[in-house]
Image (cartoon, grey):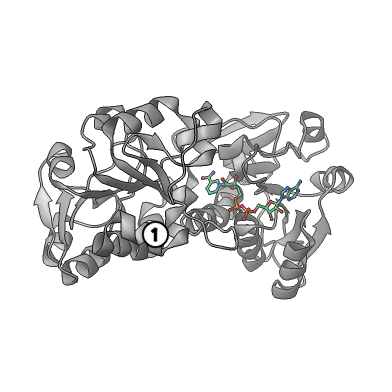
Amino acid sequence: MVIGIPKEIKNNESRVGMTPAGVLELVQKGHTVYVQTGAGLGSGFTDGDYKKVGAHILDTIGQVYAISEMIVKVKEPIAEEYGMVQKNQIVFTYFHFASSLQLTEAMMESKAICIAYETVEESDGSLPLLTPMSEVAGRMAIQQGAKYLEKPKKGRGVLLGGVPGVPPGRVLVLGAGVVGIQAAKMAAGLGAHVTILDINMKRLRYVNDVMPPHVVTEFSNEFNIRKHVATHDLIVGGVLVKGGRAPKLITRDMLKLMHPGAVIVDVAVDQGGCVETSHPTTHEDPVFIIDDVVHYCVANMPGAVPYTSTLALTNVTLPYVLELADKGWEAACADNPCLNKGLNIIRGEVVHDGIAEAFGFDEKWVV
Ligand SMILES: NC(=O)c1ccc[n+]([C@@H]2O[C@H](COP(=O)([O-])OP(=O)(O)OC[C@H]3O[C@@H](n4cnc5c(N)ncnc54)[C@H](O)[C@@H]3O)[C@@H](O)[C@H]2O)c1
C-alpha cells in the first residue's frame, strides 16, 4: 500500500503520525511510504532520518494526499486540507467528529474512509489510542503544577518535595484513572503527600495496592473534596464520565477555601473541565488566576512534549497501521473488532453512533 505522512498544520501541533521506526517496519513489509518534507522536525526527526529507512520525501502536503492510499496523521484535517482528501483514501488519525459538524460534512463529502484513533476500543471498553496521551498529560500535570507553585509564577511558593525539617507539598488528585494514577505517581516520586479520590472502588483498591503509603485514597464526594481543597497546594483534575461532560467537582465557592497561590491543573478541561472556573487555555498563555488560585487549563497538554508524545502515540498506532496496510481496511476491520470500532465515516456514510447521535444523522452500521 502507498502510505502518506503529511506535516501537521494545525496551530501548535508538532507531533507527526509516524516515526522512522514505523516507516522501517512498513517498508520491510513491502509498502511505500511518502513523508512530507519537515513533517518530523517538531518531534526531532529529519528528512534524512526518514530517507535512511526507505521513505520518499515530498515537497508539499498536496502531493502527499494526492499519491497516498492511506494517510496517517495526528490531528483531524483542518479546512485547508479538506479538499486534498481523496475518494476511497483511508485517513487514520484523531478526528473527534462529534465536536465539529463542518469537519464531519467535509469528510462525508470527500468519500474517504475515516478511521478515528479515539474510537478504536478494546473489548474491555478501554481506548488504546487515547491512553498514551492521558499518560503524558497525567505526568505533565505535576511538572506544570510544580512550576506554577513557584512564587515568580504567582504560586504559593511551595516546593513539592519539601526539604529535611520542612513538610512536603500536598497534591490532591481527582480521578484515579490513567491521568490520575500517572499524576499521583509523579507527585509521590517527588516526595509530595498525595490524596487521590475516585468513585470507583476498584480503582482506589488498585492505587492503594501499588502506591507507596504517602499516597492516600479516599472516596470522591463533595464533603471530602471541600475538606481537602483547603489543605492541598496542587489539585489535578483527571475525572472522566464516558461520553459525557466532566462533573464540576470544584465549584467557584470552594476557591475561597483554598490557600492563596494554590494551583489547579484541570486536565479534564478538554471535556469541559471538572472545575467550575476552568476554561481551555493554550501553551502560549496557559494560566489564569481567579480568587488567588492559579488555573492551568491547557486542552492539548501533550503538544508541549512532541518528542515523547509522538513516540508514545506511534507505539500504539503502528500495529493498526500495519494491519490496514497489509490487508486493506475492509479485511483489517472485519478481522479486528477493536479496529472496526474506529470506523467513523465510510464513503460519505456515518457509521458510528456517537457522531450520528451528535448530529441527528441516520446511523448505518457496517457488519
Ligand atoms: N488536557 C489534555 O491535554 C488531556 C490529555 C489527555 C487526557 N485528557 C482528559 O483527561 C481526562 C481523564 O482521562 P483518563 O484517560 O484519565 O480517563 P479515565 O477514564 O482513565 O479516568 C477517569 C476517572 O475519573 C473517575 N471519576 C468519574 N467521576 C468521578 C468523580 N465524581 N470523582 C472522582 N473521580 C471520578 C472515573 O471513575 C475514572 O477512574 C479526560 O477528560 C481526558 O479527555 C486531557
Residue, disc 1: 334
Q: Which of 121 and 295 is in front in this view?
A: 121
The percent position of residue 214, horizontal first and vertical second, equals 76, 68
**x and y, in percent, of residue 244 in the image:** 65, 39
Find numbered disc 1 in the image and state the secondary structure of the residue it sits on.
helix
Q: Which residue is drawn at 35% across and 66% down?
A: 319
| Mark 1 residue type | Ala
Density class for disc 1 (Cα within 10 Å; few <14, some 14-19, many ≥20) is few
Examine the rendered structure and indicate whether residue 285 appears above or below residue 173.
Answer: above
x 18%, y 41%: residue: 65
Taking the image as drawn, is residue 323 in sight? yes
Would residue 112 be found to the left or right of residue 181 on screen? Answer: left
Residue at the (31%, 55%) spot, across then down: 329
Image-based side of 181 in relation to 333, left or right: right
Residue 121 at x, y percent in the picture: 51, 56
Judge from the rendering whether residue 309 lies leftward or rightward of residue 122; answer left or right.
left
Query: In this view of the protein, can residue 296 be seen by the observer?
Result: no
Q: Quadrant of the N terminus?
A: bottom left
- Image: 314 above or below 352: below
**Quarter-of-image position of residue 77:** top left
Where 246 falls versus 342 (above or below)? above
Residue 219 in which image quadrant: bottom right
Q: Which of 282 and 355 is in front in this view?
A: 355
